[in-house]
Image (tube, rainbow, N blue to C red):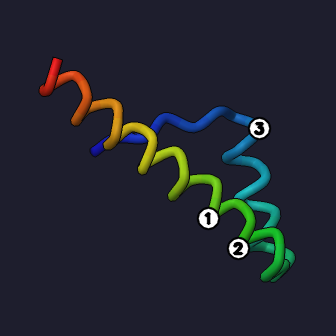
Amino acid sequence: MVLSISDDEFIRMKMAVTDGDVDDALQILKKLVQRLEQQKNQGMKSHLG
């Protein structure tokens, strides 16, 4: 599974890691997991239809 991220998202991730901002890192991770789940669900729908 591949998830494309924007330059802004990558910079935000780097900043969260560098700053040790646990809350921001968790928010980023939650959004990435949500996007992966959406992709997975879309893939499943395409196989059904």
Residue displayed at 78% across by 82% down: 22
Tell me the SS state at disc 1.
Answer: helix
| Residue at x 63%, y 63% (from the top left corner) | 30
Question: In the image, residue 18 lies at what x, y percent?
Answer: 79, 73
- Report, in whole angstroms, how far the alpha carbon at label 3 lies from the one at label 1: 15 Å
Q: Are marks 3 and 1 in contact (CB under 8 Å)?
A: no
Q: Is residue 7 above or below residue 34?
A: above
Of discs 2 and 3, which sits in the foreground?
Answer: 2
Distance from Cα at disc 2 to Cα at disc 3: 17 Å
Closer to the chain start, of discs 2 and 3, is 3
- Could you say which is closer to the camera, residue 44 or residue 19? 44
Q: Amino acid at mark 2?
A: Leu
43 up-or-down from 16: above or below: above
Comparing labels 3 and 1, the label whose residue is closer to the camera = 1
Q: Is residue 46 above or below residue 41?
A: above
Q: Which residue is pictured at 82% across the width and 78% down the height? A: 23
Amino acid on which disc 3 is placed: Asp
Horizontally, is 34 left or right of 31 in the view? left
Query: In the image, what residue occupies the spot 82% across and 69% down?
Result: 24
Please provide percent x and percent y for residue 41. 34, 40
**Is residue 29 or residue 42 the one in the foreground?**
42
Judging by the rendered image, the residue that carries numbered circle 1 is 29
Q: Are marks 1 and 2 in contact (CB under 8 Å)?
A: yes
Question: Which residue does the numbered mark 2 point to in the structure image?
Answer: 26
Secondary element at tag 3: helix
Dividing the image into 4 quarters, which one contains the C terminus? top left
What secondary structure is found at the residue carrying circle 2? helix
* Residue designated by label 3: 8
When asked about the image quadrant of residue 15, the answer is bottom right
Q: Pick the residue in front: 6 or 44.
A: 44
Residue type at mark 1 is Leu
